Image (tube, grey):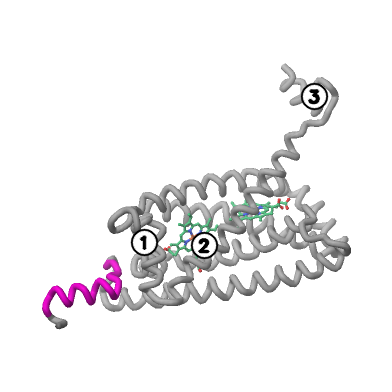
């Protein structure tokens, strides 16, 4: 009954405003923070290919807990991807509340932003746009990784990027997630006053510089990584090796020794 009254009148029986919006904001910030930090880790793990194929192979096997399960267990990566997907969907559901719902709302927001000429208000627009794009781009990626966790590795990932045409999607997703993530973390720091100190204005300026530096850093790292997978995928396609799995150098040497070819 009280839900019904609040539903129609926008106030509880005690004439108080609901606390739900504040809770939803908190969930949005918490999931955003988690995803933002997760993505930093993610970009470093994925960029292991820039060191060497063997290193990327070792990182993959580490996440499959090959130190416990012989040869690794990709199901663990599927479970991790599922958990991330749930957090991603929760965050997106909270984010939907902030997107303009019709053209009139959009027009009001745009006029307000233009009129204010305030950089942080413009940042909000970028965040709404990149967030919307990730509904589609992020879902495709996470679903594929979750259902094909056994196909992660120096060759399998490169084949997916090149031969399975994931690179155009990754270019867009990389741009969206890097802008959205760093702007989001910046906004969080400002919103909750994490590093305010004695002079919040000076802090905001500093935070802006960090934001810019981090965006550039992760974009350059991300595009270098993507180029590395594209190159390996292209070479595999040229050599007719698409679908072949990578054998780490140590294992190749061992095989050769067992074969009697190396004394
Ligand atoms: C479908 C996917 C997503 C949608 C629709 C979405 C939407 C949004 C929106 C609209 C905001 C603005 C909230 C505000 O300023 O009041 C936001 C904030 C944020 N998002 Fe996302 N987002 C998505 C995915 C992600 C991902 C993958 C990350 C990780 C990099 C992320 C990190 C953040 C952060 C750190 C914030 C700041 C939280 C806050 O201001 O409370 N988001 N998101
Ligand atoms: C547990 C969850 C996740 C796992 C295990 C994972 C794994 C991977 C792997 C293995 C790659 C290399 C390419 C491939 O194999 O297809 C990759 C690339 C990529 N992932 Fe994820 N991913 C996860 C979640 C996410 C999320 C939530 C986002 C952003 C919304 C994201 C954005 C990207 C981007 C942009 C690339 C291209 C990398 C680059 O250009 O440097 N991933 N991911």
Q: Which mark is residue 42?
A: 2
Instruction: State which mark lies toward you, 2 or 3.
Output: 2
- Magenta-colored stretch includes residue 173: no
Q: In this figure, which residue is indicated by the disc labeled 1?
A: 61
Q: Nearer the N terminus, badge 1 or badge 2? A: 2
Report x, y in % for residue 174: 56, 65
Q: Nearer the N terminus, badge 3 or badge 1? A: 3
Q: Is residue 210 left or right of residue 171?
A: right
Q: How many marks?
A: 3
Given the current orientation, which residue lies at the most extreme left position?
260
* Boundaries of the magenta span: 244-260
Residue at the location (50% across, 46% down)? Answer: 83
- Queried on whether the Cβ of the residue with tag 2 lies below 8 angstroms from ligand 2, the answer reads yes
Q: CA distance from mark 3 to mark 1?
A: 54 Å
| Disc 3: CA contacts within 10 A as few (<14), some (14-19) or many (>=20) | some
Secondary structure beneath label 2: helix
| Disc 2: CA contacts within 10 A as few (<14), some (14-19) or many (>=20) | few
Residue at the location (36% across, 73% down)? Answer: 54
Is the C terminus in the top left, top right, bottom left or bottom right quadrant? bottom left
Instruction: State which mark lies toward you, 1 or 2.
Output: 1
**Does the image show residue 34?**
yes
Figure check: 113 above or below 214: above
Q: CA distance from mark 2 to mark 3?
A: 44 Å
């Amino acid at each position: 009954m009280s839900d019904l009254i609040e539903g129609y009148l926008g106030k509880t029986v005690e004439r108080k405003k609901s606390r739900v919006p504040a809770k939803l904001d908190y969930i949005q910030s918490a999931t955003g923070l988690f995803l933002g930090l997760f993505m930093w880790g993610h970009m470093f793990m994925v960029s292991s290919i820039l060191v060497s194929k063997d290193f990327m192979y070792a990182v993959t096997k580490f996440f499959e807990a090959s130190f416990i399960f012989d040869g690794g267990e990709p199901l663990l990566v599927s479970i991790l991807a599922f958990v991330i997907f749930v957090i991603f969907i929760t965050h997106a559901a909270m984010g939907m509340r902030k997107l303009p719902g019709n053209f009139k709302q959009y027009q009001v927001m745009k006029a307000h932003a233009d009129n204010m000429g305030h950089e942080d208000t413009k940042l909000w627009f970028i965040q709404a746009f990149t967030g919307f794009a990730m509904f589609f781009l992020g879902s495709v990626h996470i679903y594929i990784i979750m259902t094909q966790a056994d196909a992660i590795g120096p060759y399998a990932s490169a084949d997916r990027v090149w031969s399975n045409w994931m690179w155009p999607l990754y270019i867009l997703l990389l741009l969206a997630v890097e802008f959205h993530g760093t702007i989001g973390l910046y906004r969080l720091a400002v919103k909750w006053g994490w590093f305010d100190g004695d002079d919040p204005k000076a802090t905001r300026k500093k935070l802006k510089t960090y934001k810019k530096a981090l965006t550039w850093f992760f974009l350059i790292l991300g595009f270098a990584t993507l180029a590395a997978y594209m190159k390996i995928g292209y070479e595999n396609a040229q050599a007719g090796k698409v679908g072949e799995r990578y054998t780490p150098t140590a294992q190749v040497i061992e095989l050769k020794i067992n074969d009697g070819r190396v004394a």
